[in-house]
């Protein structure tokens, strides 16, 4: 995955190795989307095993810290509840940041 920082952030297409994919396409791939290269018209997606592990951690973060925050709120401890809620939000932000770095892979079948 080669890219340069700035407005013109581009990512390599795994098919033609050209820097044709923009940040919006990359983030769309991180949401389990299929990206079509504007140059070679072939399809690619984020590496599904890495993306699955990332989403597993995301669900784990929300369930664990969200539940602990809820329990602390119900036991009239709003400060501790807010701390755990902050940890949950920070975890979602960190995992969202790493979602942009999941490598793109080529999709072999191109039926349409
Ligand atoms: Zn391409």
Image (tube, grey):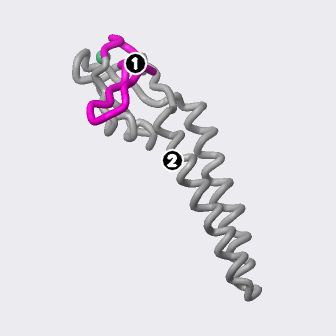
**Residue at 61% across / 54% down in the picture?**
91
Badge 1: how crowded within 10 Å, few (<14), some, or many (20+)?
Answer: few
- Of 75 and 108, nearer the camera is 75
Image-based side of 111 in relation to 1, left or right? left
Instruction: Reply above or below: 87 against 53.
Output: below
Disc 1 element: loop
Pick the quarter of the image with the C terminus.
top left
Q: Which mark is residue 109?
A: 1
Query: Does the magenta-highlighted stretch encompass residue 70?
Result: no
Q: Position of residue 79 (x, y in %)?
A: 69, 80
Residue projecting furthest to the right: 75
Query: Does the magenta-highlighted stretch encompass residue 6?
Result: yes
Image-based side of 47 in relation to 27, left or right? right
- Of 21 and 83, nearer the camera is 83
Residue projecting furthest to the top: 16
Image-based side of 10 in relation to 51, left or right? left
Residue projecting furthest to the bottom: 76
The boundaries of the magenta stretch are: 1-18
Badge 2: how crowded within 10 Å, few (<14), some, or many (20+)?
Answer: some
**Residue at 73% across / 88% down in the picture?**
76
Which residue is denoted by mark 2 in the rendering? 96
Badge count: 2
Q: Position of residue 81 (x, y in %)?
A: 69, 76
Q: Main secondary structure of the magenta part?
A: loop
Q: Position of residue 23 (x, y in %)?
A: 34, 36
């Amino acid at each position: 995955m080669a890219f340069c920082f700035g407005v013109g952030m581009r990512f390599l297409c795994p098919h033609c190795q050209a820097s044709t994919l923009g940040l919006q396409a990359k983030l769309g791939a991180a949401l389990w989307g299929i990206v079509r290269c504007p140059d070679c018209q072939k399809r690619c997606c984020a590496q599904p095993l890495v993306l699955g592990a990332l989403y597993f951690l995301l669900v784990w973060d929300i369930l664990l810290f969200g539940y602990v925050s809820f329990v602390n709120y119900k036991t009239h401890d709003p400060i501790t509840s807010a701390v755990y809620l902050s940890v949950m939000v920070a975890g979602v932000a960190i995992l969202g940041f790493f979602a942009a770095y999941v490598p793109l892979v080529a999709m072999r079948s191109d039926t349409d």
